[in-house]
Image: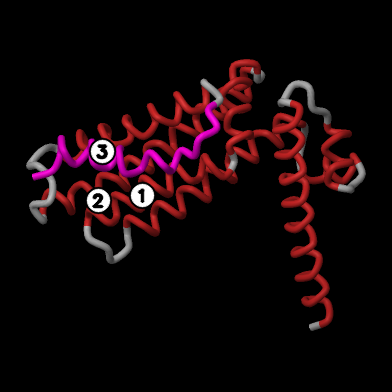
């Protein structure tokens, strides 16, 4: 019993340390950019030794990739909860768009750095990132398909192929995000939710 408690404590500590390092890396990357940052700086920011950082992460690119994985996982869980919730289609649509945009608002600096510095990552890391983001996009697309199928079935959306409606919605959202990131805009992305939803419903509403 004592051994199990000790093991559980060590596991919790390991998870907490990993999260502290990730948060420190996010702050350092946001402040200095990916390529100007060093593992030493991240270790100091996290108040750990450099060796402790390497216990959890292979290198700086592994840290960068892990941050992206964490952000996309959290967003995916949030979106899945909305799609599978009890709300009507229009409410789901508004919540979905707002949650999607808010996730970028909350980590503005990190995602702006990702947009600028992604082409400078090693080919191996770019390939990992491409596979990861493609998988997440397809999973999100399937989630949106469910929402569109519900809307078409209930007569709230036009009788169109649900996949086409899903691609249209995500295309609008991602266009706003790309423009916001690449131009380094400071206004909250989530403020665009009403416009995006109304634009979509005017074209896809029944």
Q: Main secondary structure of the magenta part?
A: helix
Q: How is the image coloured?
A: secondary structure
Q: Is residue 106 magenta?
A: no
Question: What is the quadrant of the C terminus in the image?
Answer: top left
**Where residue 64 sits in the image (x, y, percent)?**
67, 34
Disc 1 target residue: 96
Residue drawn at point x = 11 percent, y = 56 percent: 154
Q: Is residue 205 magenta?
A: yes
The tag on residue 147 is: 2
Question: What is the quadrant of the N terminus in the image?
Answer: bottom right
Residue drawn at point x = 71 percent, y = 37 percent: 63
- Asked if labels 1 and 2 touch by Cβ distance under 8 angstroms, the answer is yes
Count of numbered tags: 3
**Horizontally, is 146 left or right of 127 in the view?**
left
The tag on residue 166 is: 3
**Where residue 17 sits in the image (x, y, percent)?**
79, 54
Q: Secondary structure at mark 3?
A: helix
Disc 2/disc 3 C-alpha distance (Å): 9 Å
Of residues 167 and 184, the one nearer the viewer is 184
Highlighted magenta segment, given as a residue range: 185-206
Q: Badge 3: how crowded within 10 Å, few (<14), some, or many (20+)?
A: many
**Where residue 200 sits in the image (x, y, percent)?**
22, 38
**Horizontally, is 104 left or right of 125 in the view?**
left
Quarter of the figure with residue 205: top left
Mark nearer the N terminus (3 vs 1): 1
The tag on residue 134 is: none
Residue drawn at point x = 74 percent, y = 31 percent: 31
Q: Secondary structure at mark 1?
A: helix
- Asked if labels 3 and 2 touch by Cβ distance under 8 angstroms, the answer is yes
Q: Taking 29 as reference, is 140 above or below it?
A: below
- Residue at the extreme bottom: 1
Of residues 193 and 25, the one nearer the viewer is 193
């Amino acid at each position: 019993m004592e051994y199990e408690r000790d093991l559980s404590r060590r596991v919790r500590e390991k998870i907490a340390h990993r999260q502290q390092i990730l948060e420190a890396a996010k702050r350092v990357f946001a402040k200095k950019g990916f390529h100007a940052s060093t593992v030493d700086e991240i270790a100091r920011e996290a108040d750990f030794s450099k060796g402790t950082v390497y216990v959890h992460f292979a290198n700086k690119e592994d840290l960068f990739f892990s941050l992206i994985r964490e952000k996309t996982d959290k967003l995916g869980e949030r979106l899945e909860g909305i799609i599978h919730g009890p709300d009507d289609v229009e409410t789901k649509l508004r919540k979905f768009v707002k949650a999607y945009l808010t996730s970028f608002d909350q980590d503005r600096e990190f995602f702006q750095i990702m947009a600028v510095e992604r082409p400078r990552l090693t080919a191996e890391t770019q390939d990992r990132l491409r596979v990861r983001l493609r998988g997440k996009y397809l999973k999100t697309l399937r989630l949106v398909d469910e929402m569109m199928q519900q809307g078409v079935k209930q007569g709230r959306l036009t009788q169109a192929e649900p996949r086409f409606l899903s691609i249209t919605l995500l295309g609008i959202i991602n266009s706003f995000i790309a423009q916001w990131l690449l131009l380094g805009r400071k206004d909250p992305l989530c403020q665009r939710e009403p416009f995006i939803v109304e634009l979509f419903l005017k074209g896809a509403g029944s």
